[in-house]
Amino acid sequence: MGKKVKKEAEPPPKDVFDPLTIESKKAATVVLMLNSPEEEILAKACEAIYRFALKGEENKATLLELGAVEPLTKLLTHEDKIVRRNATMIFGILASNNDVKKLLRELDVMNSVIAQLAPEEEVVIHEFASLCLANMSAEYTSKVQILEHGGLEPLVRLLASPDPDVKKNSVECIYNLTQDFQCRAALQELNAIPPILDLLKSEYPVIQLLALKTLGIITNDKEARTTLRDNQGVDHLIKILETKELNDLHIEALSVIANCLEDMDTLVLIQQTGGLKKLLSFAENSTIPDIQKNAAKAITKAAYDPENRKLFHEQEVEKCLVALLGSENDGTKIAASQAISAMCENTGSKEFFNNQGIPQLIVLLKSDSEEVREAASLALANLTTCHPANAKAVAEADGVDPLVTILSSRRDGAVANAATVLANVAMQEPLRAGLQSHGVTSALLGPLRSANTVVQSKAALTVAATACDVEARTELRNSGGLEPLAELLRSKNDEVRRHASWAVMVCANDELTAAELCKLGALDILEEVNLSASRKNKFSEAAYNKLLNNNLSLKYSLTGYLSSSNIISDGFYDYGRINPGTKLLPLKDLCLQEPSDQRAVLLVNSKSSDVSPPPSTEDKSSDVGYGRSISSSSSFRRASKEKTKKGRGKKEEERVKEEEEVSTLPKLMGEGSPEKEWYPPFDPDFRVYVYEVTKSIFPITNIKEQIEVLARYVAEKMGGKMSKEKLHNFSWELHISELKFQLKSNVVPIGQIKKGIFYHRALLFKALADKIGIGCSLVRGEYGRAWNEVQLMNESRKGLIGALPPPEVYIVDLMFHPGGLMKLRSREADLYRYL
């Protein structure tokens, strides 16, 4: 055999490129390789970029700057599985960078990423595709894109993956997505709760924690709570709480239970299985503050339902909450206080906290934490509302001082709560008296000026409760509290306006306070408010009437009516009818005006000033004007009594002495001295009238006889009995004009009028009747008419046993048959007959 000859290798074809091995140390070079058509190069380039990206955030930013993201997105759909896998791994890492996430949203790659979750794909692709979605889902826009591209269904499916990383990424993404309500609804349709519950059995705490967080959100919906209950989810949660080794999951487990407790059926289930007692014991005995806090929050959420409160009360939840008040952790104290606030809707709970709870809450009012003080004050506000015993317990436990201190807090909620408690305490008269010694009234000035409507409302309510006492009203007036209170009447908030009106109504019980409120414009504001159908309320109307009752001159001008309880006092004047919204000038301004052709202003004043000599039935007159030199001792009858004077033979020296007295009085009254106090013109004739009726009519024991005698007396002083036929000849207008000219003023004292018709006589009758205690009303009619109405019992019914019928109303005749009483049956007909 011959020797074998070695066969020579065939040379490669001329059109084939010889293999080239390149070692690159620049990321930019590798990024360029992403555009290669060769699968092996693409796979190796992706693998290199993945390792580079794993090294840190700076490398991710570098890859973004080098333009690696856009070519990588194309590789997500590459035919080669290795290329596709490596590209997916890169995006799982890169998507944690915010700038990369933004670019990915713009490139609209969500559909490509979600496609990697298909069942036929490798587990590693599932892992990094779900990681990419978990990173992307932290932002709202990406959440929308994931939902729109159907990403939720494959994520739910992957919760059952055998790979823990896939489970972790999937549940984390679902947790982020559940922040959106549309996702929560979609999860319910996909029946996601059972696989999420299965994750609670995982050996990896991070997966359990994410599952609990997800359940904590989706169980805010009632349907989800029902599904959780039907799948024995509550048992899983209770077991977690019972397992000490899982204490890092207890806080989140409690959050889920808190949601479940809102559902009555779930609460009953927990209670029947003994879970509720376990929960309360767990909360009370735990040494972890956050667990105690979350347990209290769970009770708070559930206690908003009345049936739940009843169940909690039966389980003596109050003891647990009182124990939590003693925690050293502020968050736990706050949560326990809030739970007590919620439980206060149950009467039994309120009574329990009377002895246990209120003292501890008062201690919390002195806490250094403003949040704790606010929560404690809220609990006390709810405990004392409509519960006098608890309000008394607060006062007896020395709770007033810290509450007053909180009124100056920077937290509006705390201020409003403290004001509410103080108002509840002040509702009880024995406790109210003690509040003043703690400076409550002055402490309310700040809240009254607050910009917060809730604070304004509660402060005004507290004023209404405390101002029932004279001392409180005096302090409020002296400390400047009436001004902000009056301003609150303008509030656009209905409750603020209502409570401010209530407070003004209470304050108006004091004549001085009512006068000060009128000076501050409260009456004008209330009048404006009551003209609006949408702004007025019963309290604004009552406050307006109360202020009017302390300003009868304005009341009579506006309403044309004074009741028997509206007692005319010195200084009252009848200006005539004015329209709502029209301002009534003060008496001083009216006195300073020159006489005009306007209706005379009728003045009632039997009180002389300090500089006046005592009144005399002798005639001492002055014809000087009120504003310039008003003689308080003048009888104002100089012209009408001139003939009488001469008939009495008055001595010349007495007349000279009188003129000297008149000429010196202007100096006494402060002419040209504005700083001197101004006094209304004195009416000595009216004082004489008062003296005479007090002496002759007041002793009469029969009320009807008193009325008849007084009516005749008034008619006699006003020109006597008149006949309807001769009424037009009764020259009362000329008489009034002469008086105005002589007095140099439109203000005419009622006692000076000797020729008076209906409205003159009616006013005089009312003024004198009020002086001697005869109850009568004063009613203004049209065309200068006015009359008095009195109430009398039917004589024939006196002495009968049983309920008496209401008294009958009569009109007092002062004109045509003075002393006559006309029974008022049909107001219009009877008035027509009289007038």
Image: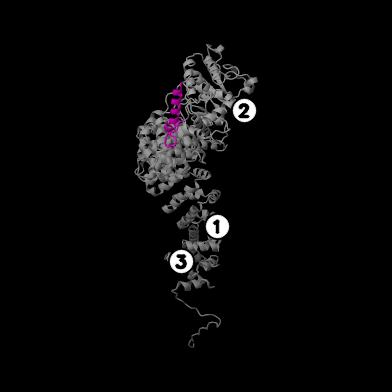
Q: Is residue 3 above or below residue 722?
A: below
Residue 207: x percent and y percent? 44, 53
Q: Which residues are magenta?
A: 651-679
- Colour convention of the picture: one colour
Left or right of 130 on screen, residue 445: left
Question: Residue 56 versus residue 798: which sits nearer the camera?
Answer: 798
Report helix, strand or loop for mark 1: helix
Q: Amino acid at mark 3?
A: Ala
Distance CA(mark 1)–CA(mark 3): 24 Å
Residue appearing at x 35%, y 42% in the figure: 367
Q: Nearer the viewer, mark 2 or mark 3?
A: 2
Q: Are marks 1 and 2 in contact (CB under 8 Å)?
A: no
- Please give the residue where the numbered disc 1 appears in the rendered image: 145
**Quadrant of the rendered image containing residue 467:** top left
Question: Residue 333 versus residue 119: which sits nearer the camera?
Answer: 333
Q: Nearer the viewer, mark 1 or mark 3?
A: 3
- Please give the residue where the numbered disc 3 appears in the rendered image: 61
